[in-house]
Image (spheres, rainbow, N blue to C red):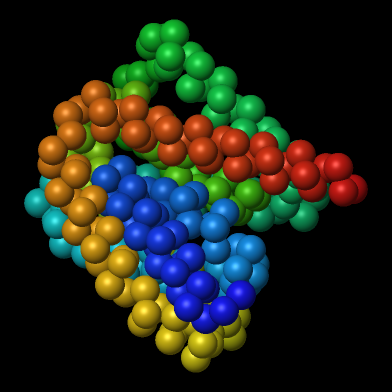
Amino acid sequence: MTDALLIAVVSISVFMASLFSTVTGFGFALVAVPFLMPVLGPKETVVFIIFGTCLVKMIVLWNTRKHFEWRTVIVTVCGSVLGSLPGGYLLNAIPSAYLQILLGVVLVIVLALMGMHFDLSVKNKTLGRMAAGFCSGFSAATTSISGPPIALYFLTEGRDKLVTRANMCWIFAFGNIGTMASLALSGSRISTDLMLLAAYVTLPMLLGTWLGERCFHKINQHLFIRLTQIFVVIGACTALYRGITALLQL
């Protein structure tokens, strides 16, 4: 692939990922990874996605600073940390293919119940947020997919889109900081080529973030919920595809 074509593919991927993740509060990796993995490679894609997500999050965090709730964010992040512990253990005990299929099936079932208008709301919000964070941390440790469990839970709370997006942005920002710290401690670094590529696609990323912010304020609550559900479906399909593919290769 020529340098020009590579920059074009990455620019379009980053633009779309920035746009949709700004609108919903999560999903940058869900959009970008399928397009970047074939052209950058697995390791480079992970590092590039973390770098790109952090840049987008910094902008969105500023825009949502008046709407997020510290208590909600802290409780959910604590749950995520707790969930990552058994998740890391099970990842070594059970093939990841089974865990990814399980995640995909659970997400599909919950979405189906929501579509049939089952009341999935939790009366104890603190416990519910802790549990959502736990599921997210567990999912991240076992399948590398962390967004859908938290997004699904916050949809059941029925909060205003401003608060829902703000809380998810801040929750996942803490997760990104933790991931970057882990990579730094493990000796992983962003290469010169990746830094140069990131510089080339900064403009499409900023443009996608700016357009996503404008779109967010124009859409109504119903459309926000539908877009979030679509991203959860993408997450479920991604988990099922990875799991089934890995299972067939065992």
Viewer-closest of 24 and 155: 24
Residue 177, given in percent of the width and then of the height, sits at 40, 68
Indicate whether 188 appears above or below 243.
Answer: below
Pick whichever, 129 or 59, lies toward us.
Answer: 59
* Relative image position of residue 28 (x, y in whole percent): 41, 54
User: In the image, is residue 33 above or below residue 214?
Assistant: below
The residue lying at 39 percent from left, 55 percent from top is 17
Could you tell me which quadrant the N terminus lies in? bottom right
Q: Residue furthest left?
A: 66
Residue 204 in picture, x, y percent from top left:
31, 67
Can residue 129 be seen at all in this image of the molecule?
yes
Residue at (46% x, 35% y) in the render:
232
Tell which residue pokes out farthest to the right in this image.
250
The residue closer to the viewer here, 179 or 122, is: 179
| Side of 49 relative to 67 (left or right) | right
Depth order, front residue of 96/138: 96
Q: Please give the count of numbered marks on the rendered protein.
A: 0
Using the rendered view, name the quadrant where residue 57 is placed: bottom left
Q: Position of residue 54 (x, y in %)?
A: 35, 67
Q: Residue at x 35, y 60 (%)?
A: 15
Eyeballing the image, is 199 above or below 93?
A: below
- Residue 103 in sight here: no
Viewed as shown, does residue 15 lie left or right of 162? right
Q: Is residue 224 left or right of residue 229?
A: left
Q: Residue at x 90, y 48 (%)?
A: 250
